[in-house]
Amino acid sequence: MRVIVMVKADKDSEAGVMPSQQILTDMGKFNEELVKAGVMLAAEGLHPSSKGKRVRFAGGKRIVTDGPFTETKELVAGFWLWQVRSMEEAMEWLKRSPFDGGAEVEIRPVFEAEDFGAALTPELREQEERLRKEVEKRKAS
């Protein structure tokens, strides 16, 4: 199963405070463990919400709001995409992470094709597979 591991924003990440060399070193070691174990598929940190935008879709309109966004506790500062056998395995990995100081991290399963049942017709499944292959091909070049 794939899971997304979302690191919640805090006042420092929203202020654009960069992590210390020690934090980067510790996180690098942890990420190496994840890669060697075949768990990590992707990982990225995000700029503060002040550099972002939100788009609300309402009645055919697209309403754009510039950041920053006020509810810091609902914002994401970074993420991993992991391949694990179970939510329990994901939790075990996360407990080994070098986070400290009140960090909050959320783990959620990523939908797989079979989760959509009959709504994902053979044609839609083929389209999904074709698009995934195209993305992989572009990453390789």
Image (tube, grey):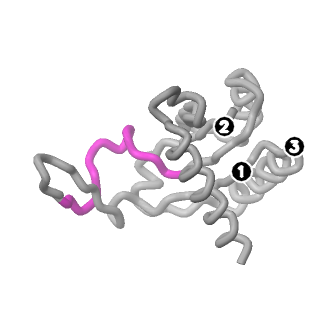
- Mark 2–mark 1 Cα distance, whole angstroms, equals 9 Å
Q: Circle 2 sits on which residue?
A: 2
Q: Tell me residue 120's x, y (percent).
A: 49, 36
Give me the residue at 40% from left, 45% from top: 75
Mark 2 neighbour density, 10 Å: few (under 14) some (14–19) many (20 or more)? many
Image quarter of the N terminus: top right
- Quick check: 101 left or right of 96? left
Q: Is residue 76 magenta?
A: yes
In the image, is residue 77 above or below residue 109?
Answer: below
Instruction: Give the extent of the magenta segment.
Output: 64-78
Q: Residue furthest bottom?
A: 141
- Mark 3–mark 1 Cα distance, whole angstroms, equals 11 Å
Amino acid type shown at disc 1: Leu
**Which secondary structure, mark 2?**
strand
Q: Nearer the viewer, residue 22 or 14?
A: 14
Residue 102 visible, this angle: no
**Which secondary structure, mark 1?**
strand
For the residues labelled 3 and 1, say whether their Cβ atoms are less than 8 Å apart. no
Give me the residue at 54% from left, 33% from top: 106
Q: Circle 3 sits on which residue?
A: 37
Which image quadrant for residue 82? top right
Of pointers 2 and 1, the one earlier in the residue sequence:
2
Image quarter of the C terminus: bottom right
Q: Circle 1 sits on which residue?
A: 41
Give me the residue at 58% from left, 49% from top: 126
Mark 1 neighbour density, 10 Å: few (under 14) some (14–19) many (20 or more)? some
Of pointers 3 and 2, the one earlier in the residue sequence:
2
- Mark 3–mark 2 Cα distance, whole angstroms, equals 14 Å
Amino acid type shown at disc 2: Arg
For the residues labelled 2 and 1, say whether their Cβ atoms are less than 8 Å apart. yes
